[in-house]
Image (cartoon, helix red, strand yellow):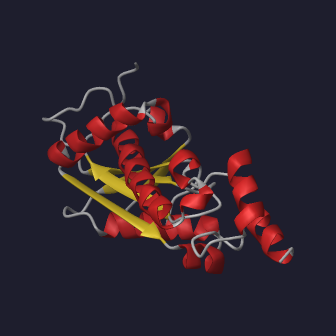
Amino acid sequence: MPELIVPDGLVCGIDEAGRGPLAGTVVAAAVILDPLRPIHGLNDSKKLSKKRRDALALLIRERALAWSVASASVEEIDHINILHATMLAMQRAVAGLALRPTSGMVDGNRCPQLDIPCEAVIKGDGKIASIAAASILAKTVRDAEMLVLHERYPQYGFDRHMGYPTAAHFKALESHGASPVHRRSFAPVARQLSLL
């Protein structure tokens, strides 16, 4: 596993989970790591097993100088679109940090509007340790939220696909229609609603 870069100073890594799903919130995290308390094994959350992600999430919460997780609701996603809702969740995550960062680094190709300098890093969750840490927190928090929604709406199988557009999810949408936690602005959900 590659050693990821740990930037100097109070740089917060920012990442999101849940842009692609048809249901649930979009979750963002911001993390300022402590260079004196390194966390080994950080990587893009998608490249880690659930067990490894959960273990690393605990270490990040223990060892980071500051961390914050925030989200944008399904209603916000439908109202302002998924890109703007993602940026809003990122702004909220940065605003929630207990320490004010000097700058931010975001996974991807665009930055949210922040009152600190910010740099977008393509595939940053596999290059920059604090972005990887943010990707792990965002993913574990969102997955936990989807498991709670699974309890409420077991017919959709959220515990298996976490709201992503899978064959099983499309089939459940066909059989049961959209739930209150489905994103009505997303084409497959809108299509299903138009059939009712």
On screen, residue 169 versus residue 116, left or right, reads right
At a point 59% along the width and 76% down the height, the residue shown is: 180
On screen, residue 68 versus residue 15, left or right, reads left
Residue 182 percent across, percent down from the top left: 63, 69
Q: Is residue 150 above or below residue 178?
A: above
Quadrant where the C terminus lies? bottom right
Residue 168 percent across, percent down from the top left: 69, 48
At a point 43% along the width and 67% down the height, the residue shown is: 71
Q: Nearer the viewer, residue 158 or 128?
A: 158
At a point 62% along the width and 66% down the height, the residue shown is: 82
Q: Is residue 6 above or below residue 58?
A: above
At a point 45% along the width and 62% down the height, the residue shown is: 151
Q: Is residue 67 above or below residue 112?
A: above
One can see residue 172 in this view: yes
Q: Nearer the viewer, residue 43 or 49?
A: 49
Residue 149 percent across, percent down from the top left: 47, 64
Rendered image quadrant of residue 179 = bottom right
Q: Looking at the image, which residue sits at the far left?
A: 36
One can see residue 114 in this view: no
